[in-house]
Amino acid sequence: MLGSGDPFTTFVATLSFWIGAVASIAAAYMMVARISNLIRAALALTTVLGAIAMMYALLGADFLAGAQLAIYIGAVMVLIMFAIFMTPGQIDLPGLVGRGQRMGAVLVSLGIGAISIWVVIYTPWKLRDTLLDIPT
């Protein structure tokens, strides 16, 4: 979809990308930092995995998008939910992480984010002039 000549298709694909990216980052943040209920954290993980499947679909990798939906969301998430329900007394987790460990995690996250942004900006990416016409 991305890279097609049609401006409407490009607009819809770009809008879908940004909606999926923001939803995925917000769900990942809530899953890690804010949600203490394991069921809700698993559902947030489902949102992240669904957004990844949408990214695959936008990039034209139809097989990977379908596999992401079927395997990770369809099977792995059901298994995770089943394991959560079968473990007695583990649905609500108390805050076990101290302030020092949170600050360390924030520093490591910022470092990895800065390195990732640097790599994306300064890597000479090779771009194709035309789209591939072979099925994925």
Image: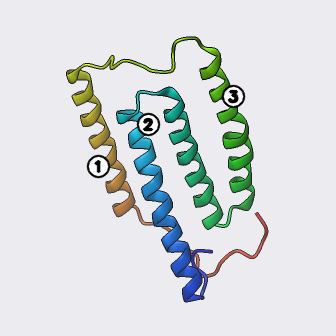
Q: Reply above or below: 22 against 106.
A: below
Image quadrant where one finds the N terminus? bottom right
| Secondary structure beneath label 2 | helix
Residue farthest to the top, as pictured: 88
* Sequence-wise first label, 3 or 1: 3
Q: Reply above or below: 85 against 33.
A: above
Frontmost of labels 2 and 1 is 2
Question: Is 131 positioned to the left or the right of 51 in the image?
Answer: right
Q: How crowded is mark 1: few (under 14 residues within 10 Å), some or many (20 or more)?
A: few
Q: Name the residue under label 3.
A: 79
* Sequence-wise first label, 2 or 3: 2
* Image coords of residue 23 (percent x, y): 46, 54
Residue at x-position 50% and y-position 27%: 38
| Secondary structure beneath label 3 | helix
Could you give the CA–CA distance between mark 2 and mark 3, rounded to whole angstroms?
Answer: 18 Å
Q: Reply above or below: 113 against 41.
A: below
Task: Name the foreground residue: 121 vs 77.
Answer: 77
Residue at x-position 42% and y-position 66%: 124
Q: Name the residue under label 2.
A: 31
**Residue type at the position of mark 2:** Met
Quarter-of-image position of residue 51: bottom right
Q: Name the residue under label 1.
A: 114
**Residue type at the position of mark 3:** Leu
* Image coords of residue 106 (percent x, y): 26, 35
Could you give the CA–CA distance between mark 3 and mark 1, rounded to whole angstroms?
Answer: 34 Å
Task: Name the foreground residue: 83 vs 8.
Answer: 83
Residue at x-position 50% and y-position 73%: 14
Q: How many marks?
A: 3
Q: Residues within 10 Å of mark 3 (few under 14, many from 20)?
A: few
Question: Is 121 positioned to the left or the right of 83 in the image?
Answer: left
Question: Is 135 positioned to the left or the right of 48 in the image?
Answer: right
